Amino acid sequence: MTATGRASAVGFAIDKKGYVALGRSGRYGPALKDCWEYDPENDKWTQKADFPGKARVKAVGVGLNGKGYVGLGYDISGSVYANKYDLKDFWCFDPSNTTNPWTQKADFPSPYTDACVCIAYKNEIFIGCGFDGFGFSRYFWKYNPDKDEWISLNISPGPERVGGTMCTDGERIFYGTGYNTYNQNDWWEYFPVSDSWKNLKRMPDTGRENGLSVSIKDKDSLVHYFVTTGRHFAGNLTGGGVKSDIVEYDAIRNVWYKRGNIPNDAGRENALIFTIDGKGYIGFGENDSNILNDFWCFKP
């Protein structure tokens, strides 16, 4: 494990290594700046250079072409929730540079930086939705690393939201869940060539926020799309609470299947996930009592 458990952190993979950074070690802080590398072959964690920006929660992190891209999020050092603590800075992490692996890039052009969705697709990074301290967003942007440039996209359909999920296998992109006054259970496909959206079958639950989604290719090259963890925001008597279930979206049949639960897990939110060599790695986050420091591997 990393030196401390954490929630609202970022996790991403570069080549055959995983990386975990930022987040918070307590329910109300403090926020963290450390960065850790995970070697799945040896099941070993190694600390890397700290993130050079402000410590933060609910940032975005994604691996692309041998580098990691980390930024946005929220600065929890403020005494009140205000948009001046929404963070727009964006950084590139190059693990091959052992002396100065972090380089600052162009700021994100939107104030909605808290709990956005984010994926890498082809040679670009797509980021959208989120919260700015006052309201939710449907805005989407893509980032071109070669030009260090942000491009505005069509707004997403459905409600504005925070704490949604987005995943891709490099060919198809799926998006949904989250929260906007009500829990969301909608599911969409995004087509980057036409910058358009298609409405798909809703998830087989009453919605969740702060969950995870991931795509994993099995030994037969069949892609599996999973959604897991998160919270249904409601009272204890109306289905509220954190989740440990794993559900799979069948993109061929446009149906959902329940696939079980994370072992020995009572539920969690604000966890992280990444894939390496056809395996999913999931862990950290928090439940109603504790910040978690466990880490799991699963293979479809």
Image: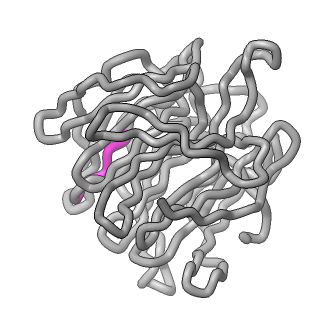
Query: In the image, 277: left or right of 143?
Result: right
Residue at the image point whose x is 37% and y is 49% from the top: 119
Magenta-highlighted stretch: main secondary structure?
Answer: strand
* Residue 105 in sight from this viewpoint: yes
Q: Quadrant of residue 147?
A: bottom left
Q: Position of residue 186 (x, y in %)?
A: 43, 23
Question: Up-down: is 63 above or below 106?
Answer: below
* Image: magenta residue range: 123-127
Q: Quadrant of residue 269?
A: top right
Residue at image position (51%, 62%) is: 280
The N terminus sits in image quarter: bottom right
**In screen coordinates, is 231 left or right of 142?**
right
Whether residue 106 appears in this view of the structure is no
Tell me residue 279's x, y (percent): 48, 66
| As drawn, 69 above or below 260 | below
Residue at the far left: name it.
194
Q: Residue at x 41, y 41 (%)?
A: 166
- Identify which residue is drawn at 73% across, 51% down: 24
Magenta stretch contains residue 138: no
Q: Position of residue 237 (x, y in %)?
A: 81, 14
